[in-house]
Amino acid sequence: MAKLKLASYWAAACGGCDVAILDTHEKILDIAAAADIVFWPIATDFKYADVEAMPDGHIDVTLFHGAVRNSENEHLAHLLRAKSKVLVAFGTCAHLGGIPGLANLFDRKAIFKCVYHDTQSTVNPDGVEPQTKTQMPEGELTLPEFYDTVMPLDHLVEVDYYVPGCPPTPKQIWAVVQAIVSGQLPPKGSVVGASEKTQCDECKLKKNEKKITSFKRIATAQPEHETCYLEQGFLCLGPVTRGGCDTRCQLSGVPCRGCYGPPPGVLDQGAKAVSAIASVIEAKDEAEIGRILAEIPDALRSLNRFGIPASLLRRKTL
Amino acid sequence: MRRISIDPITRLEGHGKIEIFLGDDGSVSNCYFQVPELRGFEKFVEGMPIEEVPRVVSRICGV
């Protein structure tokens, strides 16, 4: 059998997904034995022009990380879709929009104003902002267009598989690689490298009855680390998050923030979180319910931390 | 004037490109380094509870 041709690309990303691939440690050698890497900016020196020169369908599998937030990301999404037999939305940003998707609570104008004018560390007396085209004496320089709205990969192109996680755990990555190499892939459109259960189903912390009478902040209250955080009144997205990460946050002493995305059958993780919280609040009347809910710290960004672009909300109204 | 584009810059975290302009004699006339990337963390962490900020800004760079 000919060696697989594998690509890995980051759009609006942090590189953590690529590092998670490298965190398979010595198994990276097995990956290299099974596949020729034909494009991987973090680790190899192929250029965009090399990808553009490939015939369509040349790459067997592309692991696409990062959200789509500018025109370069969009171009690469279309380019890699055309060049790849299998396109995988790899990691939460490509799957759901991820942390960069929090920018959908603002627009380009507000972000540019903050980043290029208002921040304490910015010195910009001429008020310069990035331009898509700039004429210099030697020629024209170009930059991608920064969009108002961050998108997950499947808002733009057809995606074959989704690997959730911010980042996906190396153990799950290895399972996905083995599935690819052996051709044992589930039906197109499936979430792979995760479980079919929720975080709570897999969480080893002690669970009793959940009756929340107040929400607490980890900055101002001390949780007990062997008992369910939600029961103790610390917001945890375990009930509405897909399992598969071995509950690494909960075992590290912090509640789940939902990076593995919604569990099977759940359309909108944030909306499901509202529903889940409503079912565990212990209150006598409406006023008390209101008081308890108001204690949820930064509810919008806490209940939709990783998935605003893929949620029903998608973004704040422009 | 000849132009050499290095796009993308590789084997580092993040996105970058370099445009090199060469004069007729082949010597470098000018060179531009560009960062075609912005996500806007500065804006979207504003007002976030302080204990949540490390869990968000750790995604500025995961390398």
Image (spheres, rainbow, N blue to C red):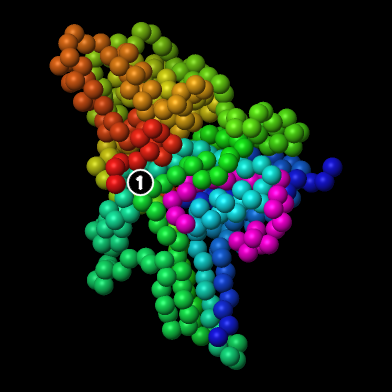
The residue drawn where x is 24% and y is 71% is: A125
Q: Residue under label 1, please give it.
A: A103
Amino acid marked by disc 1: Ala
Residue nearest the viewer, comparing A240 with A27: A240
Q: Is residue B44 visible?
A: yes
Instruction: Judge left or right: residue A91 versus residue A275.
Output: right
Q: Name, please, the residue furthest toward the bottom.
A: B25
The quarter of the displayed image where residue A108 is located: bottom left
User: Would you place residue A183 above or below residue A19 in this image?
Assistant: above
Estimate the x, y position of residue B29 in percent, counting from the top left: 51, 85
What residue is shown at x 45% (from left), y 33% (from top)? A259
Q: Is residue A43 magenta?
A: no
The chain holding disc 1 is A
Residue A294 at what x, y percent from top left?
21, 25
Q: Residue at x 45, y 44 (%)?
A: A151
Q: Can residue A223 be seen in this snapshot?
A: no
Which image quadrant: the N terminus of chain A?
top right
- What's the residue at 52%, 74% (across, down)? B19
* Magenta region, residue range: A48-71
